[in-house]
Image (spheres, rainbow, N blue to C red):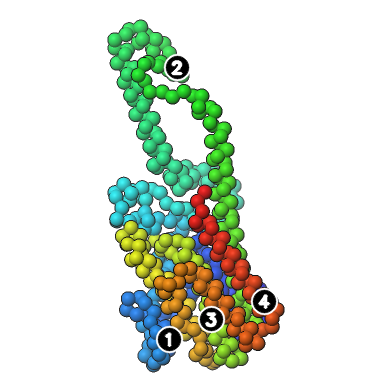
């Protein structure tokens, strides 16, 4: 796409940059931009000592050091060493010190498996002749699905069954000690024959035979429903990636960098597009997919403050003045626009904002309205941008529906 769209210098590089940033990276992990850590020019958005962005007027003093993209990446789960095509997420939910010993042990055993985006190397490995044997071995010993079934569900069923069998055997041996005829009968039985005595615990087999077919249909339905939700979510994320690329290319190619106002619109539009998937990540997860957040060690208020701090760190990489050259596609030696809205993270993280992704879409709507008002684009181009923003809303609504609706 970038190679086929004409535009000012830097447009193609920006399209490739936005496309990489709006993807899910490795699975659900978002890869932050390769942004400078410290700006040499003071910007309106500075970093406070407690991790807050504060408003400041420009001054020749250097900016405080920001959290680096590498440090943010360390907060996110890494691919499994035994299979680099997936991530086993055991975040603070499973490692929490606030949980009981049983809860922590169960968390060590159970995790959430997240498949990663395949590249050519992973596809080559996936198509090897030994893939079925490897899949069977991985499923037998390392499958998270099997581990979640074994403990605690199958473990409890097996323990109860073993207790009932031991109880029945105890009754049988006690009866055999007082009856030689019974002992001779038991000795002559095969392994498939069972002697039942009064007092033994047993269930008739008819209910299991009648309900087996219905249970099979139920399991099949739930499996199809789960897979359908996964496929729908994957399609929604792909739609988000494509719409983000399209909006970015249309803004960059429609609004020329010929004035300070146009530069501000380009900069704000690109920053908002990059902020949208990050706001969705924190909107749909309790910890922002940061494995070092121990959700049981925080109250609801403190947990919200912690996730806000982490989201602020990711937004700070986007909303800083040095990013202006990479975002707006400025020519060599051209200064960034002083009208760029660099205070946006503060407004986004206000307590009054109930849905942050929706707020980002609303701000993108103000950008398209400003483009229409400035005359930089015709009615047809602005109408197309508005329709693409509607797709953003549709994607956000569908993601909310999946998250809030259990099977």
Comes first in the chain, label 1 or label 2: 1
**Secondary structure of residue under mark 3:** helix
Local packing at callout 2 (Cα closer than 10 Å; few below 14, some 14-19, many 20+) is few
Comes first in the chain, label 4 or label 2: 2
**Secondary structure of residue under mark 1:** loop
- Where is the N terminus found, in terms of image quarters? bottom right
**Secondary structure of residue under mark 2:** loop
Local packing at callout 4 (Cα closer than 10 Å; few below 14, some 14-19, many 20+) is some
In the rendered image, which residue does mark 2 sit on? Answer: 193
Work out how far the residue at label 2 is from the one at label 3, CA to CA, in angstroms: 78 Å
Identify the mark at residue 44; answer none if there is no mark: 1
Residue 100: x %, y % from top left: 29, 50
Residue 213: x %, y % from top left: 57, 32
Do tag 4 and tag 2 residues touch (Cβ < 8 Å)? no
Identify the mark at residue 268; answer none if there is no mark: 3
Q: Quadrant of residue 265?
A: bottom right
Work out how far the residue at label 3 is from the one at label 4, CA to CA, in angstroms: 19 Å
Residue 168: x %, y % from top left: 35, 22
Q: Residue at x 49, y 84 (%)?
A: 341
Work out how far the residue at label 1 is from the one at label 2, CA to CA, in angstroms: 83 Å
Comes first in the chain, label 2 or label 3: 2
Q: Is residue 12 left or right of residue 156?
A: right
């Amino acid at each position: 796409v970038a190679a086929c769209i004409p535009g000012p210098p830097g447009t193609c590089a920006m399209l490739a940059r936005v496309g990489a940033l709006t993807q899910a990276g490795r699975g659900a992990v978002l890869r932050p931009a390769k942004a400078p850590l410290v700006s040499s020019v003071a910007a309106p958005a500075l970093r406070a000592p407690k991790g807050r962005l504060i408003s400041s007027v420009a001054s020749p003093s250097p900016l405080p050091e920001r959290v680096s993209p590498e440090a943010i990446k360390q907060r996110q789960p890494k691919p499994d060493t035994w299979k680099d095509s997936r991530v086993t997420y055991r975040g603070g939910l499973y490692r929490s010190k606030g949980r009981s010993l049983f809860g922590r042990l169960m968390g060590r055993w159970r995790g959430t498996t997240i498949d990663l985006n395949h590249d050519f190397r992973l596809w080559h490995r996936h198509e090897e002749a030994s893939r079925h044997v490897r899949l069977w071995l991985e499923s037998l010993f390392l499958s998270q699905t099997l581990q979640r079934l074994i403990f605690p569900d199958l473990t409890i069923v097996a323990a109860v069954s073993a207790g009932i069998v031991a109880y029945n055997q105890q009754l049988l041996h006690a009866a055999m000690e007082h009856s030689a005829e019974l002992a001779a009968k038991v000795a002559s039985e095969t392994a498939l024959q069972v002697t039942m005595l009064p007092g033994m615990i047993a269930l008739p087999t008819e209910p299991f035979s009648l309900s087996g077919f219905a249970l099979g249909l139920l399991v099949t339905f739930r499996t199809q429903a789960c897979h359908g939700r996964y496929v729908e979510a994957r399609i929604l994320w792909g739609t988000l990636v494509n719409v983000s690329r399209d909006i970015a290319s249309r803004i960059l190619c429609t609004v020329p960098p010929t004035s300070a106002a146009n530069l501000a619109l380009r900069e704000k539009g690109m920053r908002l597009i990059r902020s949208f998937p990050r706001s969705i990540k924190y909107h749909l997860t309790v910890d922002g997919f940061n494995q070092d957040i121990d959700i049981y060690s925080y109250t609801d208020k403190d947990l919200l403050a912690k996730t806000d701090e982490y989201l602020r760190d990711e937004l700070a990489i986007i909303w800083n003045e040095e990013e202006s050259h990479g975002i707006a596609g400025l020519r060599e030696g051209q200064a960034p626009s002083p009208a760029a809205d660099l205070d946006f993270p503060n407004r986004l993280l206000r307590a009054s904002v109930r849905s942050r992704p929706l707020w980002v879409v609303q701000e993108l709507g103000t950008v398209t309205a400003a483009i229409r008002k400035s005359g930089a684009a015709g009615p047809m181009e602005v109408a197309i941008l508005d329709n693409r923003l509607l797709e953003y809303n549709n994607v956000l609504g569908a993601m909310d529906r999946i998250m809030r609706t259990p099977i």
